[in-house]
Amino acid sequence: MSTLITNIAELMTQDAEHRVLRDAAVVIEGERISWLGPAADAPAADERVDAGGRALLPGWVDSHTHLIFAGDRTAEFEARMAGQSYSAGGIAVTTGATRSTSDFDLTRLAMGRVAEAVSQGTTYLETKTGYGLDLENEARSARIASTVADEVTYLGAHLVPAGMDAEEYTELVCGPMLTAVRPYVRWADVFCEQGAFNEDQSRRVLLACKAAGLGLRVHGNQLGEGPGVRLAVEVGAASVDHVNYLSAADVDALAASWSGWDAAGGSGTRGTVATCLPACDLSTRQPLAPGRELLDAGVQLALASNCNPGTSYTSSMAFCVTTAVLQMRLSVHEAVRAATYGGALALGRESGNDVDGERAVGSVAVGHRADLHLLNAPSATHLAYRPGIPLTHAVWRAGVAQPTR
């Protein structure tokens, strides 16, 4: 079954050539993109969709979420808006609610959150464990996550549970808990921050997970300058996320990690992606991550929602893009690229085609997965030009049209 999407006013490919095509068309065949180019040259297809002069983008790639949870932290949010500062300890509230919720209900809640994200144009997403914080519940969270998300990250090192010794818990995270979650996860993460895990504990977790064959990510530099960025680069993490407080040395280290990368061609030795989480920054009233400075230094950037119950209860990637343009000084093209190709780069899914069977996401190119987001607007600029207006008109995920709201 093939589908021709034609009469596209603006096609922002986010491919290696950064092409923006006008009066364009795309052909989907199965789950892949089989052709794109001028609408006048489009081949025949089994089905024809008239885009009506709208803009077409790659689907959003949300590379940082926490969707496996139960409970509510509205009171914490209200207190923070009234002036109380954010600390990592609120995670424990969600842990209690998550542990007491059945598998069925945890799965149902997570599926609802994924559906909400997809309806707004997210076509590929990562989610983490981290609200179980014991062997049984972390393994359960990983198993459930593997049924609802495209990529799963082990975050047993989210917080030391109340009543446990930090060193003993770190050993559990590096040992039996890692063994229990391993069949369900591709990545591992650690919250390297004051009030969570210190540098030594974080390094031990990351190295144990790397030895187990997992890719690495780091929560770092959210609440103040610290070792997170430096540690992420040291261990070859795919991304370091939050990055609100960066020293000049941190920026230099991230930039140096990309020195062997051909940014124009998207090839070479990859470094550590800096993932900015602007919705979280607004909710916690932290300074926005310095996305402009990072891009100017040559760092590859991603934008993600950080959807979670405590600090960023939104799955709207459009909101993150809008914020990045209006408040972080990114251009529309840069923000969209960070929310699509950048997320794919952070997840190691920016390349791949029919030959290797791992189809790329985050860009529109022949052979890539047909993840497409049609806006109810003639250009992507409207995402920032009309902030807060729902602009998703249609979504295809792996070539399949999705319900929208």
Image: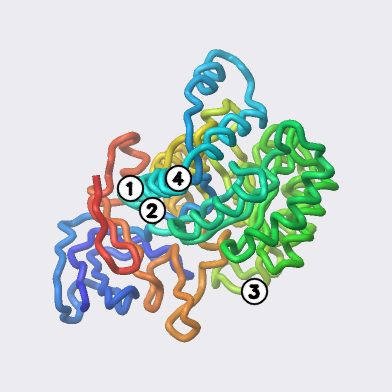
The answer to whether mark 1 and mark 2 are in CB contact below 8 A is yes
Q: Secondary structure at mark 4?
A: helix
Q: Residue furthest top?
A: 82
Instruction: Categorize mark 4 by other alpha carbons within 10 Å: few (<14), some (14-19), many (20+).
Output: many
Q: Nearer the viewer, mark 3 or mark 2?
A: 2
Seen at 41% across and 39% down, the residue is 319
Q: Secondary structure at mark 2?
A: strand
Mark 1 or mark 4: which comes first in sequence? 4
318 vs 96, nearest the viewer: 96
Q: Number of numbered discs present? A: 4
Q: Is residue 269 left or right of residue 5?
A: right
Mark 3 or mark 2: which comes first in sequence? 2
Instruction: Categorize mark 1 by other alpha carbons within 10 Å: few (<14), some (14-19), many (20+).
Output: many
Q: CA distance from mark 3 to mark 4?
A: 40 Å
**Residue 116 quadrant:** top left
Q: Secondary structure at mark 1?
A: loop
The residue at which mark 2 appears reads as 122
| 255 lies above or below 308 | below
The residue at which mark 4 appears reads as 106
Q: CA distance from mark 1 to mark 2?
A: 6 Å
Mark 1 or mark 3: which comes first in sequence? 1
Q: Amino acid at mark 1?
A: Gln
Q: Name the colouring of the figure.
A: rainbow
The residue at which mark 3 appears reads as 268
Q: CA distance from mark 2 to mark 4?
A: 21 Å
Q: CA distance from mark 3 to mark 2?
A: 27 Å
Q: CA distance from mark 1 to mark 3?
A: 33 Å
